[in-house]
Image (spheres, helix red, strand yellow):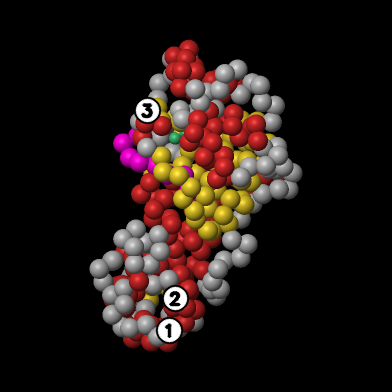
Amino acid sequence: MEKLSNPQKTIEILQKYQFVFQKRFGQNFLIDPHVLEKIMAAAQIGPEDCVLEIGPGIGTMTQYLAERAARVVAVEIDEGLIPILQETLKDYGNVTLIRADILKVDIKELAQEYGGGRPFKVVANLPYYITTPIVMGLLEGDAPVESITVMVQKEVADRMQAGPGSKDYGALSLAVQYYADPYIAANVPPNCFIPRPNVGSAVIRLTRHAVPPVHVEDPALLFRIIRASFNQRRKTLVNSLNNSQELACTKEEAAQALEYLGLGPSVRGEALTLEEFAGIANYLSGHIGERTEADA
Ligand code: SAM
């Protein structure tokens, strides 16, 4: 069967099934073979790999993955796409199609069932409306995931990769970088999709760290501190930590933590590295508690 990356073939299939795009599922299908090749190169799929594809759509990228990997597990929420996928993937015996919402799937179980004990390489052209819950769910949980190579909104890719001092730097940058090493592999314009999205896109690869790059006693506290620091971007860190609804931290405690790390009292969260946030969390761990109803 002719590949779906040929736009004519995509149009033919869509017409044959009279497919109606569901905006609520973030459906923008890839129609550019060069972009698909770039995604494959970034994902570094080899013949031993087990791939989890989120949202196969009509199977365009699934065909590429199936030609390279040992197995592809493709999870699609839209029931209307299943008969189409059964046709477009019929020549690929190594594809398992699952009709489900990826946010409700137990990925650990999937890996056990289909991965033969190997961690997944996740590859996807993500539905943009749930990019962050999908990516953070894959990173935070105990699912065996080695790398995540995904098409996301360009702005989100920039935020994931940003470092201190950049306007894009924030809680998402730090959360992603605690778990993984981000690398933007390609920028992708709207005309590579049908229908065209009204934002630019980028392919980003997140390679999971074997161990986090910083040691923290209490990772949950680290993330509360990070969220507090960026909730009020224009405020100093001392004020942000003191004002947070999630922390019971006085201005004095916050100032002591900064002094301990050799940071000035008027520093803002956007200037701090992950290592410095980890230092603050380790200093405050034990000094402060979680904010309770009584503190509020
Ligand atoms: N992979 C295809 C491609 O590149 O042409 C389609 C990508 S499209 C941007 C996103 C896909 O994710 C759609 O097929 C959509 O139906 C599916 N999707 C949306 N929400 C989902 C969810 N919660 N779980 C699984 N799939 C979902």
Q: Residues within 10 Å of mark 2 (few under 14, many from 20)?
A: some
Distance in Å between CA atoms under marks 1 and 2 = 7 Å
| Kind of residue at disc 2 | Glu
Q: Is residue 46 above or below residue 239?
A: above
Q: Earlier in the sequence, mark 1 or mark 3?
A: 3
Q: Earlier in the sequence, mark 1 or mark 2?
A: 1
SS type, badge 1: loop
Dividing the image into 4 quarters, which one contains the C terminus? bottom left
| Kind of residue at disc 1 | Leu
Task: Please name the residue that numbered disc 2 is placed on.
Answer: 276
Task: Please name the residue that numbered disc 1 is placed on.
Answer: 261
Which residues are drawn in magenta?
Answer: 197-204
Q: Residue furthest front?
A: 34
Q: Is residue 168 above or below residue 265?
A: above
- Asked if the residue at label 3 sits under 8 Å from ligand 1, the reply is no
Q: Residues within 10 Å of mark 3 (few under 14, many from 20)?
A: some
Query: Looking at the picture, how far across and down is residue 9, in whole percent?
Result: 49, 18
Task: Please name the residue that numbered disc 3 is placed on.
Answer: 195
Residue 41: in sight, yes or no? yes
Distance in Å between CA atoms under marks 1 and 3 = 51 Å
